[in-house]
Image (tube, rainbow, N blue to C red):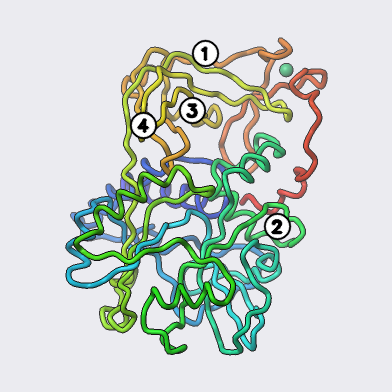
Amino acid sequence: MTEMRRLIEILNAASKAYYCGGQYIMSDKKFDLLYDKLKRLERTTGIVLPDSPTQKVGYEVKSNLIKVKHERRSLSLEKTKEKNDMVKWLGKHQGVLSWKCDGLTVILTYDNGKLIKAATRGNGNLGEDITHNALHFEGVLRNINDNRHIVIRGEAVITYDSFRKINGSLPAEKKYRNPRGMASGSVRLLDSQKSAKYQIRFIPFDLANALDLGIERVSESLKFISNLGMKPVEWSIVDAENVVDAIQIRENAVGNLPYPTDGLVIVYDDLRLCNAVGETSKYPKYAKAFKWQDVSKTTVLRKIEWSVAKSGILSPVAVFDPVGIDGTTIKRASVHNISSMKNLKLGIGDHIKVYKANMIIPQIEEDLEKRDNVQIPTVCPECGMKLIKKIGRNNRTEFLYCINDQCPAKGEKRNESITQSEKEGVQN
Ligand SMILES: [Zn+2]
């Protein structure tokens, strides 16, 4: 029971950081591992506590944005990492395969040719009104040439380019760990002018009320979205015969996308069939997500470099023997902050497992020896002044900080496009 309690608390905290743009707690891989452990524990004991993450869809809505009840539930998808699961599941049916973009799901409602509402998915039933921000997303139309009631779901994402540029202008303790965290945070800002600076892109993936509009196939509904003048997610028709190859082709192409994906989605093309198979309390039965199988490789950690940001915060960067994963060679990975370094118990000379998050960003999964011998510097590598430790404002994350105002690392011209105060209200 105490183990169960512990798992629930860790997972809920990590999930809040994941969905609400908070600070990094653990890798997605570690999350999946602990989540499965909790699920096993619940199965064997028959006890499921009410706040267990296994009982929730997405994040809880906690902000000053106006709450919006969705006209139909917006569920998350059941995930698999096995291509062959898709063959079995498709059976004799045709499916529509598309990218699973990694951002925040947003639902647009049009009436009389006008965008009247944009809301986040929230917990699936209740989302947040973000109409004021959605008007500034690239790819969202204010007006469409169709007067009917139209509900379009899509993903609000941030490209890797924007992510790098914007993160570069944020102080270290405010930086986002990945584009998804930045998308969640900026989509949900109260001030639309601030939100607009994040260059959020909207990628439609579903016409939620297609059948009401007389459309009977998912493929047709995506064409309908194109005809309205929006650019839906890249999609193709698949069947049991070609689905494995089709997934492979996407896996090979994922590195060329400008924004992150965490896998693929396959949905039955026939909307009447989708209706007939229905959904469980948590997942629709007519669609499945294929998650990227993170390939991890073992290598040797050689050193930790400390880079000093303009804000004075030092970030550890792991340097390891070059290792090839999915066609590219990686040799460095950010370890984010001292807390995550301590959690990993990194040791110089240790064997470490590394992988690419979203098949792109190098991350350390674990240290196999956990010798925990990295020396935390006491003086700034840039100016030689004594360093201090700081605790992040709203959590226990530890940072190393150079307080010298004359430190050369602080001297460079700062990018003022997004200032610290503008980020306030984003992190919970
Ligand atoms: Zn310094």
Say which mark, if any, is on residue 375. 1
Q: Earlier in the sequence, mark 3 or mark 4?
A: 4
Residue that carries the numbered disc 2 in the rendered image: 195
Q: Nearer the viewer, mark 3 or mark 1?
A: 3
Say which mark, if any, is on residue 333. 3
Q: Residues within 10 Å of mark 3 (few under 14, many from 20)?
A: some
Q: Nearer the viewer, mark 3 or mark 4?
A: 4
The reply, left or right, for residue 126 in relation to residue 190 is left
Q: Earlier in the sequence, mark 1 or mark 2?
A: 2
The reply, left or right, for residue 85 in relation to residue 368 is left
Residue for point 78% across, 44% down = 417
Q: Amino acid at mark 2?
A: Ser
Residue for point 40% across, 17% down = 321
Element type at mark 3: strand
Q: Residues within 10 Å of mark 2 (few under 14, many from 20)?
A: many
Q: CA distance from mark 4 to mark 2?
A: 35 Å
Mark 1 within 8 Å of ligand 1, using the beta carbon? no
- Check whether the beta carbons of the residues at disc 1 and disc 2 lie within 8 A of each other: no
Q: Nearer the viewer, mark 4 or mark 2?
A: 4
Element type at mark 4: strand
Q: CA distance from mark 3 to mark 1?
A: 18 Å
- For residue 91, above or below residue 403: below
